Image (tube, helix red, strand yellow):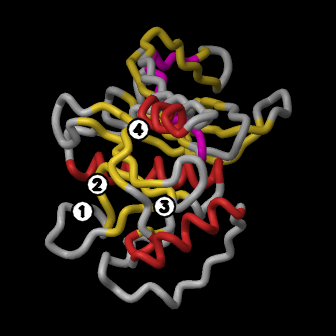
Amino acid sequence: MPHRFYVFTNVPALVTLAHDSGWTGIAGPGTDPQGRPGWVFDIPDMVPDGNGAQLNIEAEGKVPLQLRGRLTYVDDAPRAFLECDDFTLVDLPEPPPPEPPPITGSTPLEVINAVYATGAYNLATKTGCGMFTEECCRQLGALWGSPPWGHVAKAAGQNQYNAHAVDAVHCLYGGDHGIWDIITSSVSTSARPAFNRAGDSNPEIWRPPTPLPCVPAGAATRDVDLTVTLTLEDLIRVLAVLRVI
């Protein structure tokens, strides 16, 4: 007489049983004698009592479950049970990386150091320096407006990343107007964040933080529309620069 083995799950599942004798089965919907709905195997008489078996339970969106034990029968009832004594533990998924600290700062150098502190940029490589410069430029622009903060445009053939300086940013006007090196010993293992003045601001080679890549230096940019708010002092400084150009 076949024995019935019941399994109960909290969600719809695929439930299979692999017996050491070679028999395998797939459970179908069923209700146990007490009226509890679940899954049921009808185990043929040819499957011996007391041998090992592995129960596998799979469900969408759930970690698969495997249980191994000894399949036993109840002599006075057509009922089977799995006496589990063999457990396999599944590794936990890797935890997500910690959220980087927010970029804050009251000075450009503090913002630059905060970007570096995220650990996301390898300043020993040109790509790492270029990406670091882009993020610093973006953060400076977000905190103090853009303009004035932007990139130093570079022409083809010059040392550049996305048509801008690999290790410098450009403030068009204001108290920090000028071109600033933000990496010392760039593209080396000694590279570190910095904020060192490297030259005067120059509207001809200033480019906004986005879009990227930048318009190369020397390309026509006079048709780009910018809405800026200038103090009288800043306006005089910009006009003086334009008159020299």
Which span is picked out in magenta?
Answer: 61-73
**Residue at 63% across, 68% down:** 235
Residue 143 placement (x, y as % from top left): 65, 48
The residue that disc 3 covers is: 150
Q: Which of 213 and 106 is in front in this view?
A: 106
Mark 4 lies on a secondary structure that is strand
Which residue corresponds to mark 1? 160
Q: Which of 84 and 187 is in front in this view?
A: 187
Q: Residues within 10 Å of mark 2 (few under 14, many from 20)?
A: many
Residues at discs 2 and 1 in contact (Cβ within 8 Å):
yes
Mark 3 secondary-structure assignment: strand
Compared to residue 47, the image places residue 173 above or below, namely: below
The answer, for residue 239, to whether it is visible in the render is: yes
Could you tell me how far apart the alpha carbons at marks 1 and 3 are, in whole angstroms?
15 Å
- Pointer 4 local density, CA inside 10 Å: few below 14, some 14–19, many at least 20: some
Q: How far apart are marks 2 and 4 (CA)?
A: 14 Å
Q: Which of marks 2 and 1 is nearer the N terminus?
A: 1
Residue at (56, 49) in percent of width and height: 140
Front: mark 1 or 4: 4
**Which residue position is annotated with label 2?**
166
Determine the CA span between mark 2 and mark 1.
5 Å
Q: Give the amino acid type for the residue marked by disc 1 in the picture.
A: Gln
Upstream in sequence: badge 1 or badge 4:
1
Judge by depth and name the residue closer to the eye, 23 or 130. 130
Relative placement, left or right, of 127 versus 53 is left
Q: Do the residues labelled 1 and 4 touch (CB within 8 Å)?
A: no
Which quarter of the picture shows residue 49? top left
Sequence-wise, the earlier of marks 2 and 4 is 2
Mark identifier at residue 195: 4
